[in-house]
Structures are given as structure tokens and as C-alpha cells.
Amino acid sequence: MRALLLEGIHPDAVARLKADGIDVETLGRALDEAELIERVADVELLGIRSKTQVTPAVLDAAPKLLAIGAFCIGTDQIDLTAASARGVGVFNAPFSNTRSVVELALAEIIALHRRLTDKNAALHQGIWDKAADGSHEVRGRVLGIVGYGNIGSQLSVLAEALGMSVYFYDTADKLALGNARRCATLDELLAVADVVTLHVDGRPGNSGFFGEQQFARMKPGSIFLNLSRGFVIDHAALRAHLESGHLAGAAVDVFPQEPKGRGDEFVSELRGLPNVILTPHIGGSTEEAQADIGSFVANKLAQFVTEGTTTLSVNLPPVALAARPGAHRLVHIHRNTPGVLAQVNGILAEHDVNVEGQLLGTRGEVGYVLTDIGVDYSEAVLERLRAMPETIRLRVAS
């Protein structure tokens, strides 16, 4: 079995997959669609981070592909509908880099309040400026968190420990942690926050949702952070509000167009502004987070290949069936219509194949069934199962 891992995925992922006898090829950069299409014809497992796009055309060029590992939080770079229609599982790491992103956000909030970027630049130019003008503690400041998921909620707790007051806005009902207060609208949050930080997901509906109107409604002298997705904000509008003095500073870690690899030129409207901290999409890029992500996602891929387990899959039903020594495990992915399980078991019964263990799960239009059989089976059984009109994919996991 062959795996292709792109974008400098951590060596722990390579070691985990090789431990199961998988041949692993690695590449330190992203691939565009044409490049990826040329590389995936014989690939069973594909590992990416945030920049590589997995489109229907890529999936069509990868007939052997069983699963995709997104070694990051988001999966908006993968066409999940197309992957499900082809029986390709998708796995990510929804929790592994949460702490790293939160710590970067806190560091940037403190750095901007203390004007550390200005002080650092002045000293490098030989200028000693020990004035306190414009420098503030974060204690007592109001933090407005847009998106109260895993990252936003943990940031909420740590910010309160620093003495900040926390308000948050989320389109879904979320339990407020500590003393955090929920805002009914985004405008309500913008009216009170000294710091606004975005932690939203990459769904298409979030594209461009924070623009000129939202920046204009922020408090004069406030600070803005985006460590979520590059396409959710209007960068030109942000620059205008920074240059006018309406906003005191900003920190941005994600961008609408990002270079493919280390050393490539970075282009942005935000370059050259002294009160802006720019980082190259490193919110989750700590050694601790990347090692944990590498192990976590690689383990999910290995379990999917060897056992058919789909726990925490992004697009397939969550199914985990305890392994039975000596059994053969059939993995049947199908369109979710009534009677499929009865058909599967009917075919097995016709060929005198006894079911020793079985578990079915459904998710939207996809059904997923694991079946353990304890006797040798003929190729005719597999042919009959594959020939079912509802079958998307059939394979033998063990």
C-alpha cells in the first residue's frame, strides 16, 4: 500500500504508517491540482495540510485512493461530497493544535498592547525609547471572540485567567465557560470589544463575512486578530482602518493566497505596516502540535485501512467493530437506502458464509457496514456484493 504525504507532515506520521507496512512518499510543499493529478494514480492514502486542494478531478485521477488525512483542523480544502460519493474516507485532527493557536493569539494580544513590535524595531535601529505611551496591560480589557469552538472556548478560559473580560459570538448555541458572556449579534460584540479575534471555520458561507462594515463598527483604538481562515476578511479594508488610526493594531496568521512552500514570495496588502504582526500560517505550527497531529491522523488512517474503523471521520458514518482473530473483515460503503443490509446478508447466506460480527452506520446519503466472516470465501461473493446497485465501494480490510 502506498501513501503520499505533502506539505512537510511530521515524521511521526511517516513512522506510524510504515509500522503497518505502508510505503510512504513525502514532499515538503503543497501541490496544485495538475501536479497532484499526476502523482495520485497509484496512491491509497493521501496526507495534506491546509494548502493542497483535493478536487473532484483529483479524486477521479486516484481510483485506488481509500482515505485522505488532513493533518490540520480544517477540511474545507477537500471536496467532502465528492470524496463520500467515491467511498473515500476523510480524517482530520480537530483538537491537536488547539493549545498552540490559543497561545499564539494570547502572545499577539499582549505584544500589541505593549507595542513590542515598535519597541523591538526601534532598538534594532539603535533607538532607545523607554516611554510608556500607548502601552497597556491586557488586564481589564474586553476580548471579543468570534467563533466559540474548540479554540475560541479555550482562549476564553485563558484570557479570563489574565484578567480580561470575555464576550463571544457564535451562530450555534454554545455553553459559556467561566464568566464569558454570549452576544446575540456580531454588532453587539463589536460595540464592546477592545480586542476582536476570529476563530471561525472554513465553510463557504464564512467567505468575506468580516469586511468594511464590521471594521467600521469596531471601537476606536481596538485591536483585530485573524487566526482562522484567510478568506473570511477583507484585507484592503483592514489596511485602510489601520492606516487611518481607527484600529490600533492587528495580527494576521492566514491569508487568501498563501505561498506553496518555505522561501516562496509572500504578497499581501498588509505588508509594511508597523502595527501589524504577520505570521506565515503558524497558529498550529509548534513541535508539540505537529507531532500530535502526525500521530493522531496517521493512526486514524492506519485503523481505517486495517480495521475499517471510521471513528472521528469527517465524512463517513462513525463505525468501530471489535476485531476477531482469524476473521475476514468486509468493508461495504453504499448509498443509504432501505434494505441494503438485508441484501448483503442474503448474498452471504446464499454462499454459505456465516456472519460472526457486523455493524452498520449511516450518515446522510452514505451507509457503512463492517462484516466479519470466519470462513474462506469465494471471489464470487465479492463480485455479487460489488454488483449491488447501491454499492459505492467494497474492500477486504483483513
Image (cartoon, rainbow, N blue to C red):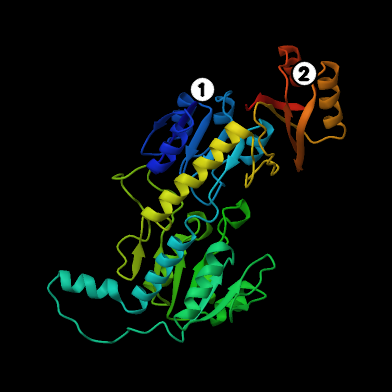
Closest to the observer: 156 or 397? 397
Label 2 vs label 1, nearer the camera: 2
Q: Secondary structure at mark 2?
A: helix
Image quarter (top left, top right, bottom left or bottom right) of the C terminus: top right
- Residue at image position (71%, 42%) is 317
Q: Does 120 sit above or below residue 236?
A: below
Image coordinates of residue 36 in percent, x first then y, are: 47, 30
Q: What residue did someone put label 2 on?
A: 387
Q: What residue did someone put label 1 on?
A: 41
- Residue at image position (54%, 36%) is 302
Q: Residue furthest left?
A: 126
Image coordinates of residue 268 in percent, x first then y, are: 37, 55
Closest to the observer: 397 or 339? 397
Closest to the observer: 127 or 288? 288
Quarter of the image for residue 377 reads top right
Closest to the observer: 248 or 363? 363
Pointer 2 and pointer 1: residues touching (CB < 8 Å)? no
Query: Of the numbered discs in the image, which one, if any, rests on residue 33?
Result: none
On the rendered structure, is 329 left or right of 119?
Answer: right
- Residue at image position (63%, 35%) is 83
Quarter of the image for residue 222 reads bottom left
Image coordinates of residue 220 in percent, x first then y, are: 46, 81
Q: Residues within 10 Å of mark 1 (few under 14, many from 20)?
A: some
Quarter of the image for residue 378 reads top right
Q: Secondary structure at mark 1?
A: loop
